Amino acid sequence: MRAMKTSSSSSRPQASALASMAAAARGKTTLADHVTSVLAQQIRSGEFAPDARLPSEMELTERFSVSRTVIREAISRLKSEGLVGSRRGSGTVVLPVTQATPFRLDLNMDDGRDSIQAVLRVIELRRGVEGEMAALAAQRRTRAQNLAIQQALQAIDAAAAAGRDGVQEDFAFHAAISNASHNPLYTSLVQFLSQFLHAAIRVSRMNEARSNEFVQQVRAEHAALAQAINDGNAEAARAAALRHMEQSALRLQAADKAFWASAEGQAAARDLARVRSGG
């Protein structure tokens, strides 16, 4: 197994991390965007050779001065691009460039390039996935996987109580359901969609946070979905997942102009613009 080339200075990622945090503070990028970009560039330039093992999660958090959550999101994005993969006993390794997937989701749309339309397209795609995924999870989940779903639901509540947007927790809830489906293709698809889902969920949750009624609706929808899976009721799980997607779209369509004029709405629009442009 070949190791990472040592031509680049170890101080460069630290300096880049500081620049990333300054840019994030200005609302121009996120830390996960920056870490993903730097690692992808190093992989494509050959600084990380094919079959080389990436530094551990702890090493990367220290190198970039970010949290483990940021590193995990960045690694997830690199996996969705086909740049890295998991190997038993080796952790995360660099894949040959020829294995990198050329497939991308293009959210640039001639019939509506605004943020609402972009998120609605993602929701439409999710409707075709989440319903059957939830039904399978209800039929196949193990006791441990069922517990993971319940804990993910509790984590969403904890994030809300702490005043956080809960984007990561919301995504983790749906990822836990994908694991419980026992179909690795669902898990891989959710992982591939992660960069788009994070942006779409962020927009949805920012909009929903403006109304206590919306917040309660989302909590009830998540709880109904988790309960149906807990009960092993495939039809109820499918219906709950589809209802959640449909209501998410309706809530987004009900967003008033004040939301998009607010600092939160503008930040959300920037997130989606970045996803649409591939930046």
Image (cartoon, grey):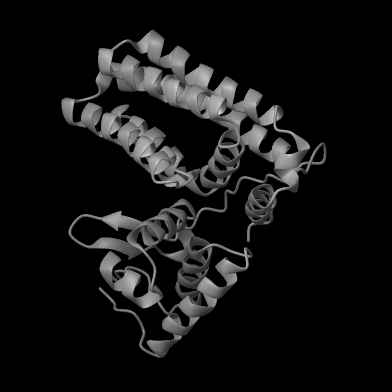
* Residue sticking out furthest to the right: 111
Closer to us: 162 or 221 = 162
State which quarter of the image contains the C terminus: bottom right
- Which image quadrant for residue 65? bottom left
Query: Residue 14 at x, y = what percent?
Result: 42, 82
* 48 w.r.t. 157: above or below: below
Query: Residue 165 at x, y = what percent?
Result: 48, 45
Q: Residue at x 45, y 70 (%)?
A: 39
* 234 w.r.t. 205: above or below: above
State which quarter of the image contains the N terminus: bottom left
Q: Residue at x 36, y 32 (%)?
A: 178
Query: Residue 38 at x, y = what percent?
Result: 49, 72
Q: Residue at x 43, y 44 (%)?
A: 191
Closer to us: 167 or 262 = 262
Q: Residue at x 58, y 41 (%)?
A: 206
Q: Would residue 102 be found to the left or right of residue 136 on screen?
A: right
Residue 185 showing in the rendered view = no
